[in-house]
Image: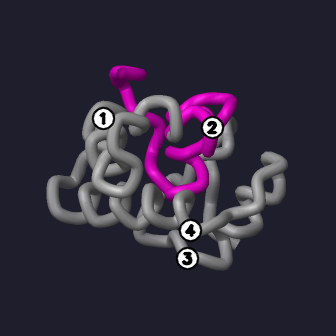
Amino acid sequence: MPEQDEEGYLVDPADWTEGWAEQAAVNQGISLADDHWFVIRFMRAQQQEHQVTPDARWVMRHLEQRRPGQGRKRLFELFPYGYVAQACRIAGMKRPRAWSTG
């Protein structure tokens, strides 16, 4: 089991697996569907490329590709308790130090 900090964020994002994400989502009352994975995989790719948790605004723009005009709304439908509280945990990000909720 990957090590987590006291708030439930992975200590090392490299320990993340899709199976771990599924369980983390279930623990938060979320059943991962296509749009969730669309967001999570984007977040993982951005983190791997830039070594930083992507800002919520970038994720909303990414969702706009799939849901024109609805990126912000859809992000909060997918993760109703918030980008940092749910999406970042499930995607295996470290807790962001500073972020924008869009």
Image quadrant where one finds the C terminus: top left
Tag 1 secondary structure: loop
Separation (CA) of disc 3 from disc 1: 21 Å
Tag 4 secondary structure: helix
Tag 3 secondary structure: loop
Q: How is the image coloured?
A: one colour
Image quadrant where one finds the N terminus: bottom right
Q: Is residue 19 above or below residue 58?
A: below
Separation (CA) of disc 3 from disc 4: 17 Å
Counting from the top left corner in percent of width and height, residue 76 is at 57, 33
Q: Are marks 3 and 1 in contact (CB under 8 Å)?
A: no
Label 1 sits on residue: 55
Separation (CA) of disc 2 from disc 1: 17 Å
Say whether residue 74 is left or right of residue 32.
left
Q: Residues within 10 Å of mark 2 (few under 14, many from 20)?
A: few
Label 3 sits on residue: 17
Label 4 sits on residue: 34
Q: Residue at x 43, y 31 (%)?
A: 72
Magenta residues span 75-102
Label 2 sits on residue: 77
Separation (CA) of disc 2 from disc 4: 13 Å
Q: Are marks 3 and 2 in contact (CB under 8 Å)?
A: no
